[in-house]
Amino acid sequence: SGSKVAAAVARELPMVQDLTARRLVLLLMVDLGPLVAPHGKVLASQLDHQDSGIRVTAMQALVAAGPGVAASSLEHVQKRMMHPHCDNRRAGVDAMRALASICPSYARAVGKGLQEEPEDVSAADALRYKCDIFRVLGGAKENAQPFLEDMCYGLEDKDWAVRRAAIEAFEDIEEHAEEAAPMVAKRLLHHEPDVRRAAAECLGRMGTHCGQYANRVEAMMETEEDEDVLRACQASYKMLQEGGAFQRGRAGAPGWG
């Protein structure tokens, strides 16, 4: 049966030493699709491989396995987000991102990281991990929606790298970020200029998906005194104007209350 073939191929994979042969085995697992879902652990182990082609093909096999692969792979893929080697760590993040849109449990597992601090890691590793969480959630699309409020707090982070990662995540989830628009716009009134700047840029990147809150950016240009924030507002206004956001948001624009 197909499931027995998939099991036999999965058993064979770790024993194949030749790179070309190993990649062919992985490509076979891609073709087997959902049949390899029970074998996510062995696929996740290939994210540790030194060859980038092996890592990429392993990720393709995980995605091809579909939502059912979560049960056998989630914990093994997620722990690679903290891998000591940057290439393998990137492979873990990329795999989490690719799977988060098809496996809600992947999005939930990483989204919880915004609500807690990682233990026993350096400050630099904690910062990088937080940025990677936003990268994964940006790929989660609809599955990121339960964490929109937590993502908004990223715009208030003291580190610009985190604020940047949050901005890019809101841009990446596209129409699924619409519910966050009022929460982002609220931060245009924040007492910290860096937060106002991040909020303005975020609304600009969200484009038409920020809805009527595009008008807040335009209004900010008339009152903002900080030069960096004002430049961010101007740049976002241009993006919103070119994207047609104001055509959508003129009528019935919300107040500042």
Image (spheres, helix red, strand yellow):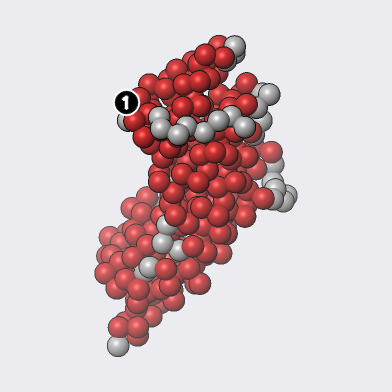
Taking the image as shown, residue 46 lies to the left or right of residue 28, namely right
Q: 216 and 257: which one is in front?
A: 257
Extreme residue toward the bottom, this view: 1
- SS class of the residue under badge 1? helix
Residue at left offset 44%, top offset 76%: 38
Quarter occupied by the N terminus: bottom left
Tell me: residue 18, above or below residue 114. Answer: below
Taking the image as shown, residue 120 lies to the left or right of residue 194, namely right
Q: Is residue 134 visible?
A: no
Residue at left offset 32%, top offset 25%: 242
Q: Which picture quadrant has residue 125?
A: top right
Tell me: residue 117, above or below residue 154. Answer: below
Tell me: residue 153, above or below residue 224. Answer: below
Expressed as whole percent of the image width and height from the top left, the position of residue 241 reads 35, 25
Residue at left offset 50%, top offset 46%: 179
Check disc 1 and give the amino acid type.
Glu
Residue at left offset 28%, top offset 60%: 20
Q: Is residue 247 visible?
A: yes
Taking the image as shown, residue 169 lies to the left or right of residue 62, namely right
Expressed as whole percent of the image width and height from the top left, the position of residue 168 reads 46, 37
Expressed as whole percent of the image width and height from the top left, the position of residue 252 reads 45, 34
Q: 104 and 249: which one is in front?
A: 249
**Mark 1 packing: few (<14 Cα in 10 Å), some, or many (20+)?**
few
* Tag 1 residue: 242
Expressed as whole percent of the image width and height from the top left, the position of residue 166 reads 53, 38
Q: 56 and 19: which one is in front?
A: 56
Q: Which picture quadrant has residue 32?
A: bottom left
Q: Tell how many labels.
A: 1
Q: Which picture quadrant has residue 249?
A: top left
